[in-house]
Image (cartoon, rainbow, N blue to C red):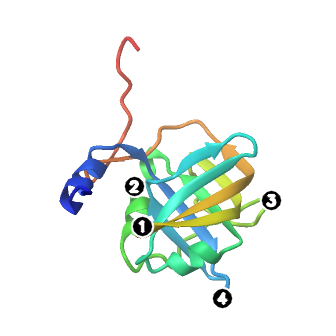
């Protein structure tokens, strides 16, 4: 018998994760949709694949699972306001938020992010109440800085252990 939903949410809160914003152009209108995620992971080196999960009841779900390309911006420690904005239900439409355009795939990317990744949608898998979106990495840029982390329903910073 599977565990309860409450216990599962407690497990999620016990896991720290880097915070990212995934953004894409809506297939129908070309408007930008974006959402904050902590489910981004690198999946494969050859070919270079990444993935993220999106809940089916998210407003931007249909756009994200049908887009031909998407951008992932791994947020820098000072970008908690960006993370909060796109984490709120109903804020997925970018509206007046400024984005950089990708150099290769022309996907929307958060300016000043620690890493910007341009992906072509490779596969979409349905699993439980989420879709897993896999992207083929066509271009990426990184810069030095500290990542924004999410743990226990709060944004925070990474503090290295001394003597590591």
Measured from the top left, where is residue 12 in percent x and y? 30, 51
The label on residue 128 is 1
**Mark 4 surroundings: few (<14), some (14-19) or many (≥20) residues within 10 A:** few
Circle 3 residue: 104
Mark 3 vs 4: CB contact within 8 A: no
Left or right of 54, for residue 80: left
Q: Can residue 111 be seen in this view?
A: no
Q: Distance between the residues labelled 2 and 4?
A: 28 Å
Residue at left offset 66%, top offset 53%: 117
Q: What element carries label 3?
A: loop
In the rendered image, residue 146, in percent from the top left (x then y), is placed at 47, 38
Is 69 situated above or below 143?
Answer: below
Q: Which residue is drawn at 71% across and 48% down?
A: 140
Residue at far top of view: 163
Of the numbered discs in the image, which one, if any, rests on residue 80?
A: 2
Q: Quadrant of residue 87?
A: bottom left
Q: Which of marks 2 and 4 is in front?
A: 4
- Name which residue lies at 59% across and 73% down: 65
- Of labels 1 and 4, earlier in sequence is 4
Q: Between disc 3 and disc 2, whose residue precedes? A: 2
Examine the rendered structure and indicate whether residue 74 appears above or below residue 6: above
């Amino acid at each position: 018998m599977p565990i309860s939903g409450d216990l599962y949410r407690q497990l999620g809160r016990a896991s720290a994760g880097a915070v990212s914003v995934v953004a894409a152009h809506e297939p129908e209108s070309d408007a930008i949709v974006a959402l904050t995620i902590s489910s981004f992971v690198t999946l494969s080196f050859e070919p270079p694949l990444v993935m993220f999960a999106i809940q089916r009841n998210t407003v931007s779900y249909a756009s994200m699972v049908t887009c031909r390309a998407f951008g992932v911006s791994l947020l820098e420690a000072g970008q908690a306001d960006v993370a909060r904005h796109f984490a709120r239900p109903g804020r997925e439409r970018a509206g007046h938020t400024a984005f950089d355009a990708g150099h290769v795939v022309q996907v929307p990317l958060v300016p000043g992010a620690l890493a910007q990744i341009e992906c072509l949608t490779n596969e979409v898998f349905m699993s439980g109440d989420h879709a897993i979106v896999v992207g083929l990495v066509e271009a990426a840029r990184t810069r030095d800085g500290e990542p924004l982390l999410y743990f226990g329903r709060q944004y925070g910073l990474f503090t290295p252990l001394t003597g590591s």
